[in-house]
Amino acid sequence: MAKVVAVNSSDRKGIPKRPVEKGYFEVGHGLKGDAHAGDWHRQVSLLGKESYAKVEAMGLKDLEVGIFAENITTEGITLYELPIGTRLQIGETVIEVTQIGKECHQACAIRKTTGDCVMPREGIFAIVITPGWVKAGDSITILS
């Protein structure tokens, strides 16, 4: 079963995010209070624990969720294999995948901290279709 491991937020771009108890995802905006939220195609970012495991296998251990600046850390779903346009029910919200991976900022704090950033290769981005709350433990369902 695919599920949410953590919801993460930060007040600045380019830095790791910190876990929050739960997050409210707004249509046309993303995670309320997060620096990356806004009216654009990358309102919400997601990265799987499976991607964390790949980086840990390279020698980096005990990586905390949010270190790669993702809003939602997942488990049990291969995010980067989802086609653009896929809709996911996560907690109360529905999101739609708009982008797989991204351009890497070579000098970002994340790369300096971890030595590698898996987000540009395996992270996904989405817009909010249905607003609602998301928290750790919520299930993730592929809708289309």
Image (spheres, rainbow, N blue to C red):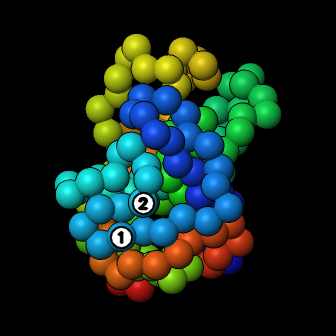
Can residue 18 be seen by looking at this rendering? Answer: yes
Decide which of 18, 129 is in the foreground and name it: 18
Category of crowding for the residue at label 1, using alpha-carbon neighbours closer than 10 angstroms: few (below 14), some (14–19), many (at least 20): many
Q: In the picture, which quadrant includes the N terminus?
A: bottom right
Q: In the picture, which quadrant includes the C terminus?
A: bottom left
Q: Position of residue 24 (x, y in %)?
A: 48, 69
Identify the element where label 2 is drawn. Answer: loop
Can residue 121 be seen by looking at this rendering? Answer: no
In the displayed structure image, the side of residue 12 where residue 113 appears, left or right: right
* Location of mark 1 (residue): 26
Q: Position of residue 104 (x, y in %)?
A: 35, 27
The disc, 1 or 2, on the residue closer to the chain's N-terminal end is 1
Q: Residue at x 51, y 83 (%)?
A: 92
Residue type at numbered disc 2: Lys
Q: Residue at x 49, y 29 (%)?
A: 15
Q: Residue at x 20, y 55 (%)?
A: 40
Mark 1 vs 2: CB contact within 8 A: yes
In the displayed structure image, the side of residue 79 where residue 120 appears, left or right: left
Distance, label 1 to label 2, CA atoms, is: 7 Å
Decide which of 122, 139 is in the foreground and name it: 139
Q: Position of residue 14 (x, y in %)?
A: 42, 29
Q: Which mark is residue 134?
A: none
Category of crowding for the residue at label 2, using alpha-carbon neighbours closer than 10 angstroms: few (below 14), some (14–19), many (at least 20): some
Residue 57 lies, with reference to residue 36, above or below; the image says: above
Q: Which mark is residue 32?
A: 2
Q: Residue at x 56, y 71 (%)?
A: 134
Q: Position of residue 23 (x, y in %)?
A: 54, 64
